[in-house]
Image (cartoon, rainbow, N blue to C red):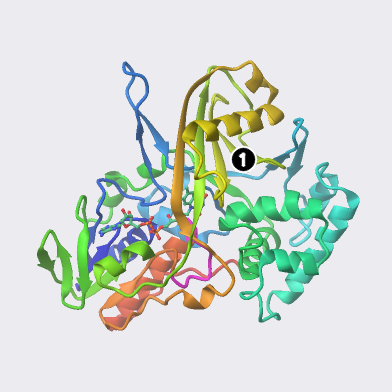
């Protein structure tokens, strides 16, 4: 079988490796770090001097049932059953009042109607406006040609959404899903999230949360079933060219090469790269001496922290702030103070609790910024070299920078390799609608 070399052991590179390895190709994957997963990974943080380190995710990663390629990738690694799905979304207002969004008995796109009408956090006028905008979104999705040129906020204002509907509904869902503010996000991404996750199919919105640390999804055990994939850790690829990969000064050759590096690393490897901006994400890990909440997760309205995930018996909480440009310049202790101040408003038990430990992860280069006029800059897998292909969440996947987007890019690059080698294969699964 033909041989393929892959640079980068994030989800894009791993998805290419799993697809090609599963089809009998001989695959060597080079990863610069001593572990896999790239931006979706876990590592050990030291506890106290007498306790062993604890494995935590760099930041809570979630998926939805509409992430069909990511789920297919987990299936290939035999870890699909480690994703736990939730049907309820909890919106909490300062003061602690909870609204729950879940599907009812009606078919899509009306499956949320009952729960939506009962949400306390929105007024009647907000809801009527949102329902109108949803109907417009269904109509305009395939008809408007300017959705990559205008921002999502422009579109929401065109649809006369109330300030509260924008803040408590549209912003709350989209800023986390696309990792960008509404005024900096191309409307096309907002459309895609709402269409696929909320309107197209009744179960598509269900939120999947890994029940194990992210890193263990791609452990050595998972790769044992793909014996012809060899993974080389601590092996930065120095140069990528049609004649091969340079690793530690040595040239490695194959029939095809996949570059699955972050876009900012391409130039150093000798390839042309688009000039995207980054958008940051801040993850805040807090360990308390007592249970703070019994909710598995919640989206927190009107403050800095956007999501809370209950990682262990309500005592270990993971908080997420997407598009966190205001937070990243702050020292870590100030970020923890802001988070605790926010939590007190939603969960009164924080007031009596003692914070045992905290850990803040500032991912400055979390994703590319999905700004207007960006889509056409995202490259296809093919490059000017017939034997070099690109993968990565920043390539043209049709999705924002997400785990699903990264896996899609990996499958697309793998398909392009098979095509070039004269043995076309289909790895990419179509979207649910
Ligand atoms: C804090 C945070 C939270 C997120 N939350 C979510 C979420 O909830 N849901 C979701 O779907 N997505 C989320 N994302 C986005 C998701 O993690 C990414 O879109 C996805 O993991 C990108 O995968 P990738 O393979 O394209 O890139 P990367 O993960 O960046 O992989 C690139 C790999 O290349 C390696 N590398 C770099 N240089 C070299 C070299 N010279 N040689 C060899 N290897 C090299 C890197 O070490 C890395 O492993 C989040 C991202 C962050 C940062």
Disc 1: which residue: 305
Rendered location of residue 404, percent (x, y) = 48, 60
**Looking at the rendering, which quadrant does residue 269 occupy?**
bottom left
Instruction: Identify the residue shown where x is 17% and y is 72%.
Output: 244
Instruction: Identify the residue shown where x is 21% and y is 61%.
Output: 237
Task: Give the image quadrant in which the ligand numbered 1 is located.
Answer: bottom left
Q: Considering depth in this image, is 103 or 40 the residue closer to the camera?
A: 40
Instruction: Identify the residue shown where x is 62% and y is 40%.
Output: 305
Q: Secondary structure at mark 1?
A: loop
Q: Considering depth in this image, is 310 or 126 the residue closer to the camera?
A: 126
**Looking at the rendering, which quadrant does residue 415 occupy?**
bottom left
* Picture quarter with the N terminus: bottom left
Name the side, left or right, on which 266 lies relative to 346. Answer: left
Rendered location of residue 35, percent (x, y) = 28, 46
Rendered location of residue 129, percent (x, y) = 85, 60
Q: Which residue is farthest left?
A: 250
Q: Is residue 106 above or below residue 339?
A: below
Q: Is residue 138 above or below residue 94?
A: below
Instruction: Identify the residue shown where x is 54% and y is 43%.
Output: 327
Let me know if residue 25 appears in the view: no
Residue 399 within the segment the image draws in magenta: yes
- Span colored in magenta: 395-404
Name the side, left or right, on which 125 lies relative to 266. Answer: right
């Amino acid at each position: 079988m033909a041989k393929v070399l892959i640079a980068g052991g994030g989800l894009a590179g791993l998805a290419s490796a799993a697809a090609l390895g599963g089809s009998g190709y001989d695959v060597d994957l080079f990863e610069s770090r001593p572990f896999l997963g790239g931006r979706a990974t876990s590592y050990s943080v030291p506890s106290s001097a007498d306790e062993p380190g604890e494995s935590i995710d760099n930041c809570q990663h979630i998926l939805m049932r509409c992430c069909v390629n990511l789920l297919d990738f987990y299936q290939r690694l035999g870890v699909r059953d480690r994703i736990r799905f939730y049907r309820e979304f909890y919106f909490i207002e300062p003061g602690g009042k909870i609204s729950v969004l879940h599907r009812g008995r009606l078919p899509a796109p009306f499956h949320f109607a009952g729960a939506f009408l009962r949400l306390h956090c929105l007024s009647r006028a907000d809801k009527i406006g949102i329902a109108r905008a949803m109907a417009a979104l269904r109509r305009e999705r395939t008809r408007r040609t300017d959705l990559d040129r205008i921002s999502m906020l422009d579109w929401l204002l065109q649809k006369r959404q109330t300030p509260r509907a924008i803040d408590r509904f549209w912003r709350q869902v989209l800023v986390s899903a696309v990792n960008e503010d509404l005024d900096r996000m191309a409307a096309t991404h907002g459309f895609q999230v709402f269409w696929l996750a909320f309107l197209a199919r009744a179960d598509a919105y269900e939120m999947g949360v890994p029940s194990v640390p992210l890193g263990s999804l791609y452990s050595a055990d998972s790769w044992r079933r793909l014996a012809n994939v060899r993974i080389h850790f601590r092996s930065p690829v120095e140069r990528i060219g049609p004649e091969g990969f340079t690793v530690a000064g040595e040239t490695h050759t194959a029939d095809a090469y996949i570059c699955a590096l972050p876009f900012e690393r391409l130039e150093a490897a000798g390839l042309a790269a688009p000039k995207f901006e980054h958008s940051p994400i801040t993850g805040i890990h807090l360990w308390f001496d007592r249970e703070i909440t019994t909710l598995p997760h919640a989206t927190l309205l009107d403050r800095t922290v956007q999501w809370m995930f209950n990682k262990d018996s309500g005592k270990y909480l993971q908080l997420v702030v997407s598009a966190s440009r205001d937070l990243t310049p702050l020292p870590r202790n100030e970020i923890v103070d802001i988070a605790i101040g926010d939590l007190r408003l939603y969960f009164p038990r924080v007031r009596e609790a003692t914070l045992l430990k905290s850990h803040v992860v500032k991912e400055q280069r979390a994703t590319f910024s999905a700004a207007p006029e960006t889509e056409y800059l995202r490259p296809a897998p093919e490059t000017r070299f017939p034997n070099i292909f690109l993968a990565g969440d920043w390539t043209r996947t049709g999705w924002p920078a997400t785990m699903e987007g990264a896996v899609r890019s990996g499958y697309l690059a793998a398909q392009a390799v098979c095509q070039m080698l004269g043995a076309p294969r289909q790895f990419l699964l179509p979207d649910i609608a």
